[in-house]
Image (tube, rainbow, N blue to C red):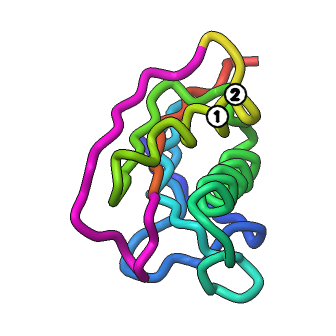
Amino acid sequence: MKKTVVHSNAAPEAIGTYSQAIKVGQTVYLSGQIPLVPETMVLIDGGISEEIEQVLKNLTSVAQAAEGSLADIVKLNIFLTDMNDFPIVNEKMVLYFSEPYPARAAIGVAALPKGSRVEMDAIMVLSDD
């Protein structure tokens, strides 16, 4: 099956040997996003709330570049350096997702790239329309 690279100028450039997303058929695999501001490639200022929102904005940009939206995400993985931040993730998710919410996992990790406190990756399935 053909693999297509998905790229958005409105999301941070890849900081390694990966693509922002890969589309295979109607399935799109979105690489992990950390709270980098695309224009500066620097972590957003503020606390964990701002970091989570920036990650969700970055995922939105990549989803749109694949001709989808966050509503098409079926699986979301959330990586947190402090699991005490998980309630804030739930608060922010209702601003970006609606029911039915995607399946998800929340994983506590020791560290993330560039000192980020949150990273999210996703699997999106586009409609056949």
Q: Is residue 115 above or below residue 75?
A: below
Q: Residue furthest top?
A: 100
Is mark 2 in CB contact (under 8 Å) with mark 1?
yes
What x and y, as percent, mark residue 12? 63, 74
Label 1 crowd (10 A; few <14 / some 14-19 / many >=20) = few
Q: Which residues are magenta?
A: 101-118
Distance between mark 2 and mark 1 Cα atoms = 6 Å
Residue 43 in view: yes
The amino acid type found where label 2 is placed reads Val
Residue 97 position by quadrant = top right
Disc number placed over residue 91 in the picture, else none: 1
Side (left or right) of 7 relative to 125: right
For residue 100: magenta? no
Q: Using the rendered view, name the quadrant where residue 70 is placed.
A: top right
**Placement of 23 over or under 40, stated as above or below:** above
Question: Secondary structure beneath disc 2?
Answer: helix
Q: Name the residue: 66% across, 39% down.
A: 92
In front: mark 2 or mark 1? 1
Q: Position of residue 39 (x, y in %)?
A: 77, 83
Q: Residue furthest front?
A: 84
Instruction: Tell me, yes or no, whether the highlighted magenta stretch contains residue 104.
Output: yes
**Amino acid carrying mark 1 in the image:** Glu
In this orientation, which residue lies closer to the viewer: 2 or 59?
59
**Mark 2, other Cα within 10 Å: few <14 / some 14–19 / many ≥20:** few
Residue at the (76%, 33%) spot, across then down? 95
